[in-house]
Amino acid sequence: MFESLHNRWHPWDGGELARFNTQLMDTGSATGDAELLDTIRQAMDYTRLSGGRFNPAVAALVREWGFNEDAPISAPPGQEKLLELLAAMPSQQQIEWMPRRLISPAGGWAIDLGGFAKGLAVDRAIELLRKDGIENAIVNAGGDLRATGRHNDRAWRIGIRHPRNPGVIAGIDISGDESVFTSGDYERFFEYQGVRYHHILDPETGYPAVGTMSLTVIAGNGAIADASATALFVAGPGEWPVLAHALGIELVMLVASDGHLEMTAAMVKRVMLENPDELTVVIVDKP
């Protein structure tokens, strides 16, 4: 299932979404099967909910940065080209949804389901396991995961990767049904003239979001956790609490670019920091 979804939902590599994106880039309108259109619409609902900080319409920008390739580019794209691609992205009000068809005013933009598809795939995997009567399981997709039930007589112990050092920065115990998703600037990046450029783009600027090294969300649903982690990463230090409150996300941990941590009060109760004496933690009780 994962392989099939990867092939279908890759933005440029010959699958269903790639064909859809070719039409969007050419004309601004595209047709696809009902499942694809429903998935795109679900993902784009988070654009509205997140105030634009999560936006699947960034595919052409991501490609310009080279982050869909095995080896990204070695220098930032030109600002003029980025502004052109930003201008081509339609607002939510400009998009018309029809059965198996999306219509927008003009071409030059495309859909990237990264930041949503992995969560949706993990949710589907959990559904398949439950249909087979499996009550205790963990589905891990590249460090992002959903766990259900328990590990024998104890909770699942989840490690949160340190964004710069080997090993983990914290551990979290999970029992019941929860998803843990982390957005980080260490997954796909390059450095140019001493600056790290990573793949999590701010949809307003076209450049990588600043201020955050990693952001972890715990939520019941993988798709919600995935999209929320991306949106809150883009919001960044000091700004994410208001958005988390709006999204209904109570469990958040941010590692800022200067190394300090920001957490909700609820997350503080769940997280076991590896080296707490070496870390500065800011607790955010209310936005």
Image (tube, helix red, strand yellow):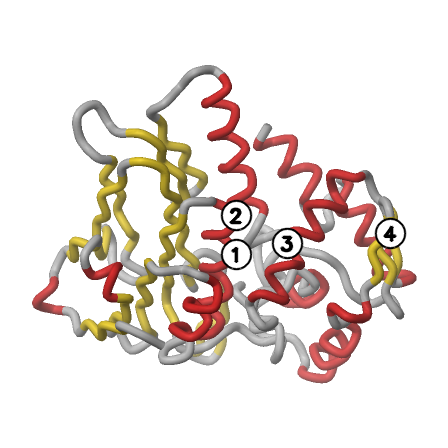
| Quadrant of the snapshot with the C terminus | bottom left
- The quadrant where residue 282 appears: bottom left
The residue labelled by disc 2 is 223
**Secondary element at image label 3:** helix
Numbered mark located on residue 227 in the image: 1
Which x, y percent locates residue 104?
A: 86, 65
Relative to 247, 28 lies left or right: right
Locate residue 120 relative to residue 15 in the image: left or right: left
Q: Contact (CB < 8 A) between labels 4 and 1?
A: no
The mark found on residue 98 in the picture is: 4
> Reading the chain from its start, which is encountered first: label 3 or label 2?
3
Q: What is the residue that sits farthest to the right in this orientation?
A: 27
Looking at the image, is mark 3 or mark 1 earlier in the sequence? 3
Residue plotted at (26% across, 59% down):
267
The residue where tag 3 is placed is 43
- x then y, percent, for residue 145: 40, 41
Q: Residue furthest top?
A: 132
Going from the N terminus, do you reach mark 3 or mark 4 first?
Answer: 3
Q: Amino acid at mark 3?
A: Ala
- Specify few, some or many for label 3: CA neighbours under 10 Å numbering under 14, 14-19, or 20 or more: many
